[in-house]
Amino acid sequence: MTAGRDVHTQRSAAGAAGRTPPAPGGRSAPGRRKPRRARPGGSAAVLAAVLALAAGAVAGTGCAAPQPAPHDGRRAGGTGDGRGPEAGRGEGLGSGHGNGNADGTGHAAGRPAAATGPDAGTDSGPDDEPVPEKCADGSDPAESLEPSSASGKAVKRIRKAGKLVVGVDQNSYLWGYRNPVTRRIEGFDIELVKAIARDLLGGDGPDRITYRTIPTDQRIPALRKGDVDMVVRTMTIDCERKKQVAFSTAYFQAGQQLLVPKKNARVKGFDATMRGKRVCYASGSTAQKMMKSHKYAELGARPVVVPNQLDCLVRLQLDEADAIVTDSALAAGQAAQDPSVRLIGKPQTSEPYGVAMNRNDTDLVRRVNKVLEDYREHGWKRAYKRWLSDAMVGTEGKEPAPPEPPDPPDHE
């Protein structure tokens, strides 16, 4: 397989897990390397066992519920197409198998905040300090509209419907994932969704919010078609995406990092050890855009492109990938799930997360920015402490704080 050429796969995590069952007696099937084994025990392992039981009831499009290694030391695999009964919650969009093109590109591929190459506007590269992206006109992509509590056309539409329809993830542990006991979607992103719903509709229960689980490369199409009112799904604000959708001010700051096995890791960093190795990332993600840029493509990795980020963890567990490139925030959640993997190196990019909305819904953008003003002062710290404090400390050298938004553009 030629280095640098995308190996785009449309298999779900279930397909990856079920590809070659173990031979009798616990031996691996002939011709395949035996998957690395996770360390048994621990809270992550307990969670995995419960998640595996609940996965069959997962609704929406995710390829697998969050699954670290179970108690017996075997790696957790996928769960099928993720469809099942779900009362009072939104339908999934798409099949969970992704809609990327043959070259591994997705509908919503966007430039990472510090991506390299001739079209990135920066000379940052492997081992450089991450440089925030600047758009072609010199503007900061994190700029957004002035906050306002006014109710315009979009806000009135949501109030008339009586529900806020939000595109979310159900596979990103700690951010947006389905609790196997309550079957509710929970996490840091979901706390923000609830804060927005309380402001718009006076409540945050299932009678006020419809969660629609969408794969990474369907976030922008879902907004442009009007299938959701907004997307709150660890979505990086960048120049390319802002041509297609509108963003709130940033509510979190992350950067692309490597996730590798703790033992016998074949990839040591964004360096020569990547050449010929299988490096996994999600279609339509900023990780994909970064790795396809000139300086990172020169490292010679063999890309493995999957519909959802959790599929990469499954691939790593099955020894079908050597490393994962993803946002440091998502990688920290995966490391919390699976104690046999770890983050290495420094973040390669500077990527702000924002709430994405349709470009026509300017009043909704302003209203969400107003909610975020109060959320940074109060709700953000509570949500961070509940969901992220244990997993995130040390991923970027210090405990993150809510990013301060830049001044609104002068031409507004």
Image (cartoon, grey):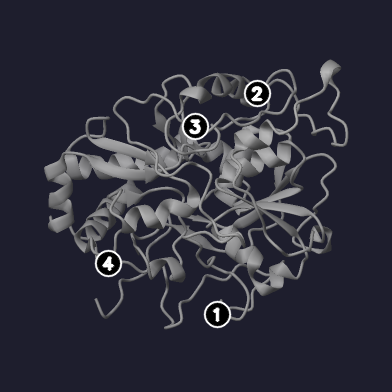
Tell me if residue 250 can be seen: yes
Seen at 27% across and 37% down, the residue is 209
Residue situated in front as seen by the camera: 25 or 279:
25
Residue situated in front as seen by the camera: 202 or 283:
283
Residue situated in front as seen by the camera: 238 or 64:
64
**SS at badge 4:** loop
Q: State which tag comes first along the sequence, 4 or 2.
A: 2
Q: Which residue is mark 2?
A: 45
Seen at 36% across and 40% down, the residue is 212
Seen at 22% across and 63% down, the residue is 362
Which of label 1 and label 3 is nearer to you?
3
Residue situated in front as seen by the camera: 117 or 393:
117
Whole-angstrom CA distance, mark 3 to mark 4, is 37 Å
User: Crowding at label 2, few (<14), some or many (≥20) Cα neighbours within 10 Å?
Assistant: many
Tell me if residue 149 can be seen: no
Q: Which residue is mark 3?
A: 82
Whole-angstrom CA distance, mark 1 to mark 3, is 40 Å
Q: Amino acid at mark 3?
A: Gly
Q: Amino acid at mark 2?
A: Ala
Q: State which tag comes first along the sequence, 1 or 2.
A: 2
Q: Which residue is mark 1?
A: 121
Q: Amino acid at mark 1?
A: Gly
Question: In which quadrant is the C terminus drawn?
Answer: bottom left
Percent x, y of residue 48: 61, 24
Whole-angstrom CA distance, mark 4 to mark 2, is 44 Å
